[in-house]
Amino acid sequence: MTAKQLKSIANVSYLLGITCAVLLYTQNTFGYISAVKTGFYFFGGLGLVLSLLQFRFLPEDKWEDFNLLFWVGSAIIFIGFMFQTMYIKYASQIIIAGLAITGLSYFFNPFRKNKDEDNDLLDN
């Protein structure tokens, strides 16, 4: 399976998971609340796992585009939303922690190499 195929399957899973989440939060489950919750858990988790697996198929020069912190933050946010749908305590704190990690990922990428030579600076 190629990275492109994995990405399209992950995108479809995300779309189905988000659809189930919207149905849950708007309380429009049409009497199928357990099926919609199961769809949210399954498709959301599948999308997250497939997006992580797609990293394996990237060539090494594209690793700078992938940020593991962003993926970890997204997984924690997903776990927080799962806790919220199950009415477990501390769901809000878990979601906030995931958002903080995701926000940190915009400033720090462990795969980005430090480039001492930055030719875009005007002061050179």
Image: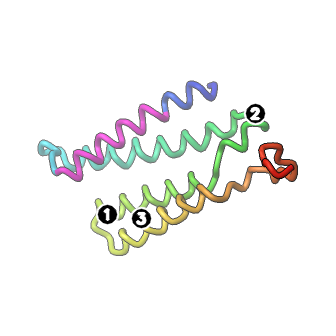
**Other residues around mark 1 within 10 Å, as few (<14) / some (14–19) / many (≥20):** some
Q: Quadrant of residue 60?
A: top right
Q: Quadrant of residue 90?
A: bottom left
Residue 29: x, y in percent? Answer: 17, 45
Please report whichever mark, 1 or 3, sits nearer to the chain's N-terminal start. Answer: 1
Image point (66%, 58%), residue name: 108
Residue lying farthest to the front in this orientation: 123
Type of the residue with mark 3: Ile
Magenta residues (range): 10-26
Residue 6: x, y in percent? Answer: 56, 30
Indicate whether residue 87 is drawn in magenta.
Answer: no
Q: CA distance from mark 1 to mark 3?
A: 9 Å
Residue assigned mark 1? 84
**Residue 37 vs residue 119, the one in the foreground:** 119
Q: Is residue 44 above or below residue 1?
A: below
Type of the residue with mark 2: Pro
Image point (78%, 44%), residue name: 120
Asked whether the beta carbons under mark 1 and mark 3 sit within 8 Å of each other, the answer is yes
Residue assigned mark 3? 95
Asked whether the beta carbons under mark 1 and mark 2 sit within 8 Å of each other, the answer is no
Type of the residue with mark 1: Gln
Image point (37%, 49%), residue name: 41
Element at label 3: helix
Residue assigned mark 2? 59
Q: Main secondary structure of the magenta part?
A: helix
